[in-house]
């Protein structure tokens, strides 16, 4: 039954992706925020499909911690779920992504209309410069900035090396940082076809005010909170 449900979900997601990629291309004349609101209907559809077909639901802790001004979100990265769900659970945001994602047929075309910050992760200082320059622009436009400091999806129970990009942007803009922990990888494993029913917990941490802090200190505080919270989250999978 799980295999059938996952196959139906993938088919429905593929159809939705093709449709919304074409809609996304048609939003080009609109403002960035208007494009965002239209295109992220796709995210809402996929999260709804995951609940309907896969039995994957979610709950949010700490929503009251979200500041009233644009912030930099630094989140745990375990699966594709959070890349789909966070853009509709948080204020409009620009995601820091691998440049290669924009080359994907349909998905990449739509993603390009969302004002992402696309970087070459091998570029070192040039990537940091791009994050700082474009991140500052997005914050000034009213977007939040979402970055996964581990860079790649990490299996539950493990942690990746926390890259400096998000903390570097915070140190150079003074924008607050919001750390987020979640256990989506328990239900939607990386590089896996099978997904499992259950309830994902998304935990939003207290705001880290960055004025006067260096990037390394910001990064250390983010990592300490996220990894500490990961150890406290309840199991996501049913039964």
Image (cartoon, helix red, strand yellow):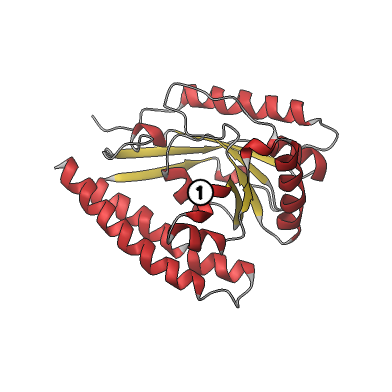
Q: Residue at x 86, y 34 (%)?
A: 212
Locate residue 222 relative to residue 193 in the image: left or right.
right
Query: Is the residue 42 above or below the residue 85 in the image?
Result: below
Location of residue 204 (image quadrant): top right
Q: Nearer the viewer, residue 234 or 33?
A: 33
Q: Percent x, y for residue 65? A: 62, 42
Q: Residue at x 50, y 76 (%)?
A: 26
The residue furthest right is: 212
The residue furthest left is: 1
Query: Is the residue 44 above or below the residue 190 in the image?
Result: below
Q: Percent x, y for residue 82? A: 46, 44
Q: Percent x, y for residue 9? A: 26, 52
Q: Percent x, y for residue 88? A: 50, 55
Q: Residue at x 44, y 64 (%)?
A: 41
Task: Quickly name the residue at label 1.
Answer: 86
Q: Nearer the viewer, residue 185 or 124?
A: 124
Q: Residue at x 36, y 28 (%)?
A: 235
Q: Quadrant of the C terminus?
A: top left
Location of residue 178 (image quadrant): top right
Helix, strand or loop under label 1: helix
Q: Note whether residue 207 is visible.
A: no
Q: Quick one: label 1, few (<14), some, or many (20+) residues within 10 Å?
A: some
Count of all numbered marks drawn on residues in the image:
1
Q: Note whether residue 59 is visible.
A: yes
Q: Quadrant of the N terminus?
A: top left
Q: Nearer the viewer, residue 21 or 75?
A: 21
Q: Nearer the viewer, residue 164 or 52?
A: 164
């Amino acid at each position: 039954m799980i295999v059938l449900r996952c196959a139906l979900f993938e088919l429905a997601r593929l159809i939705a992706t093709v449709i919304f990629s074409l809609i996304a291309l048609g939003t080009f004349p609109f403002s960035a925020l208007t494009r965002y609101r239209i295109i992220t209907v796709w995210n809402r559809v996929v999260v709804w499909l995951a609940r309907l077909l896969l039995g994957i639901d979610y709950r949010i802790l700490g929503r009251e911690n979200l500041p009233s001004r644009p912030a930099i979100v630094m989140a745990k990265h375990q699966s594709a779920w959070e890349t789909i769900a966070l853009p509709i659970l948080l204020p409009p945001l620009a995601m820091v992504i691998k440049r290669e994602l924009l080359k994907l047929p349909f998905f990449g075309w739509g993603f390009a209309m969302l004002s992402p910050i696309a970087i070459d992760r091998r570029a070192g200082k040039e990537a940091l410069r791009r994050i700082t320059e474009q991140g500052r622009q997005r914050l000034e436009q009213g977007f939040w900035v979402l970055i996964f400091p581990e860079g790649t999806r990490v299996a539950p129970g493990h942690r990746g090396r926390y890259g400096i990009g998000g903390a570097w942007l915070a140190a150079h803009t003074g924008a607050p940082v919001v750390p987020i922990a979640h256990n989506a990888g328990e239900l939607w494993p990386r590089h896996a076809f099978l997904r499992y029913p259950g309830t994902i917990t998304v935990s939003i941490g207290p705001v880290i005010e960055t004025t006067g802090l260096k990037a390394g200190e910001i990064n250390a505080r983010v990592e300490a909170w996220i990894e500490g919270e990961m150890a406290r989250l309840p199991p996501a999978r049913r039964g």
